[in-house]
Amino acid sequence: MTAKPAAAAARATVYGYPRQGRGRELKKAVEGYWKGRVSADALRETAAGLRRSNWRQLADAGITEVPTGDFSYYDHVLDTSVMVGAVPERHRAAVAADALGGYFAMARGTQDVAPLEMTKWFDTNYHYLVPELGPDTVFTADSTKQVAELREALALGHPARPVLVGPVTYLLLAKPAPGVAADFQPLTLLDRLLPVYARVLADLRAAGAEWVQLDEPALVQDRTPADLNAAARAYRELGAPADRPKVLVASYFDRLGDALPVLAAAPVEGLALDFTGGGAANLADLAAVGGLPGKRLVAGVVDGRNIWINDHQKSLTTLATLLGLAARVDVAASCSLLHVPLDASAERDIDPQIRRWLAFARQKTSEIATLARGLAQGTDAIAAELAANRADLASRAASAITHDPAVRARTAAITDADARRSQPYAQRTAAQRALLGLPLLPTTTIGSFPQTDELRTARADLRAGRLDAAGYEERIKDEIREVLAFQEKTGIDVLVHGEPERNDMVQYFAERLTGYLATRHGWVQSYGTRYVRPPVLAGDVSRPEPMTVRWTTYARSQTAKPVKGMLTGPVTMLAWSFVRDDQPLGDTARQVALALRDEVDDLEAAGTSVIQVDEPALRETLPLRAADHAEYLAWATESFRLSTSGVRPDTQIHTHMCYAEFGDIVRAIDDLDADVISLEAARSHMQVAGELARHGYPREAGPGVWDIHSPRVPSTGEAAALLRKGLAAIPAERLWVNPDCGLKTRGWPETRASLENLVAAARAVRAELTADNS
């Protein structure tokens, strides 16, 4: 294709940008504030500096309209709750006394007050704080943050567009507040919420906003007629006032489907659509509704969720088609760049040729600007960039990294029998109980223990050559012995070695498997101040040698109690990595599963009788459209079973999931055929236990009784109360007692106190059950 110049110069824009800074300055400042080492004013100045830096980077890359309002100290959905006055009753006094301290109390809780529930943002690994609403909720507008950040950008000379979570998505993401009937529908509050949004829009217009973006990603999911009618009513009302800015309604992560004609007909000035992945169907759908005559279309043609370079020729073809479907077409990433690392050029440890295949946030902004220039001026204006892009794409396609014949032959030879245990659960559970000899309501943890500064320093010293391998190993052994001794003293029944040698539950394994690349600076926000470095899955996967057997075997040699072998499952290895986009995900999952199967078999051969294969991302990766669920769940559950089905009947297989909505995948959880599953349940008040019971889940389960993403220590009584709730849904002989998740991010003082209370709660409830049966 030779693109002709567009009628109007295309704008280059993004919906959001990584918040943390090149050196994770925001994380350090926020955590310093929590510890009392950084003042509120110093934290605000750090944040302002990061915003200035981000806008400058965007402008220098050629982005002609920068986003504002996307920056957050913790979470943009929590920011929206503040903007509309939806502060839970239990936090109002704290917010009134100190807005910033109260904000963090909502996110993290205090010893006396529980935080908001946290769950995954659609099918990403970003976590948001769930709004709590009820029939008595009163909304009030507070546009202070949004107006201030807009004025900052305008004062620096940047054309800016505020970005807000849209009202329909905000309500669809909310849950009934504690004490409110479970069947309450927050969307019924729409008429009460819309005047607040209208007030915020008017405030932003008065502050100088020409455009405001309202994000409605919930509309790419399957929506009821009532939901679609609510969306139509929302934008009919928000489009009516004269004192408002132009409104751009944005969607991403998938196709809009039935919501597209609703938004196309709304009295708003523009739509932003995703044209990558599942969103590619938006192109045909847009043509089918007659396009967007008289409106602005922001075309998300650069993948905002993965890190591979864009195919410029393909994107320009899409953009050229779109020119006939809207009054003007601008160029963007498919979603906020929050979901990718900041800068690939910092990755000096990656082969320079491979680094040319990678596009992090800064590279994606350059890609967007290049496409906008090509769209506006014709392809001759970007001939050099197109030639370099073609060469880089060809280099990746031809690389030996991407194709290992031995791996592909082994994957092709998989049979149905490879993914089935030799005996059904009802038979093998007796052998497991006889071997392990555990009490009623057995206690365990999820795997990791606190990663102390000393451990991180030891890893850094090893990398820098300040500590030799022998010294490092002695440090790890000391930590394992300490973790085991604490667990034995506390009375935990099934122990873990604490994972002191592991930097991350995915990265650790990725660094030991072929086909993966590890980054040094590729940090991505998971929640709050928790940042992860997702590895890059670039080629075919195999396991050259055992990855965990040595440390698990050492831990077993230090105790007579069972010690769990700890692995990360194939779906999570994909979900928390940047996956290859040149073959179906199911094919990649099977390769990872076979590598993990080798590790599981070696753990069992070394004498490990309890093996946990974590799959916290099973629900997270569920496609947003129900029509796509069956295909995904088929390969996802098969890959887990492929990892675990080679063991003997008396080897107990555990899995773990956290921070997601489990109700709609309970059947898939059953299909995993794990002997024991542990699940997040504390913040949701044991909701998942009831979901398992309604499904008739027949295996053992440990719904968590300690919310480990909050610094507060649950009392023995609180943990016991949650445990009794669990017993109302799951029989005692199948109920385990454990935290919600791993303890890597917690400190030792709160870990000791919380686990001691957890064990005391288990003993108290166990005694109650024994007394009842006597």
Image (spheres, rainbow, N blue to C red):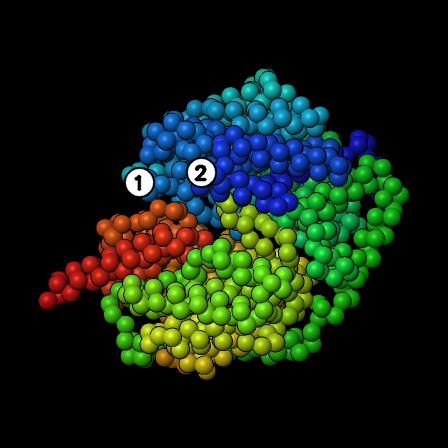
Based on the displayed image, in which of its 4 quarters is residue 243 positioned?
A: top right
Q: Residue furthest left?
A: 774
Secondary structure at badge 2 equals: loop
Picture residue at 61% right of the left edge, 73% below the top? 542
Q: Nearer the viewer, residue 146 or 582?
A: 146
Q: Position of residue 204 (x, y in %)?
A: 58, 22
Answer above or below: position of 682 versus 497. above
Q: Are marks 2 and 1 in contact (CB under 8 Å)?
A: no
Q: Which quadrant of the figure contains the C terminus?
A: bottom left
Q: Which mark, residue 112?
A: 1
Is 683 situated left or right of 519 in this image?
left
Question: The residue under label 2 is which amino acid type?
Answer: Gly
Dot 1 surroundings within 10 Å: few (below 14), some, or many (20 or more)? Answer: few
Q: Position of residue 92 (x, y in %)?
A: 36, 30
The answer to whether residue 759 shows anywhere in this view is: yes
Q: Vertically, is 239 above or below 165?
A: above
Type of amino acid at the residue the image marks with label 1:
Asp
Q: Is residue 307 above or below residue 613?
A: above
Question: Quadrant location of residue 288?
Answer: top right
- Circle 2 sits on which residue? 36
Judge by depth and name the residue closer to the eye, 565 or 14: 565
The Cα atoms of the two marked residues, 2 and 1, are separated by 19 Å
Front disc: 2 or 1: 2
Q: Secondary structure at mark 1?
A: loop
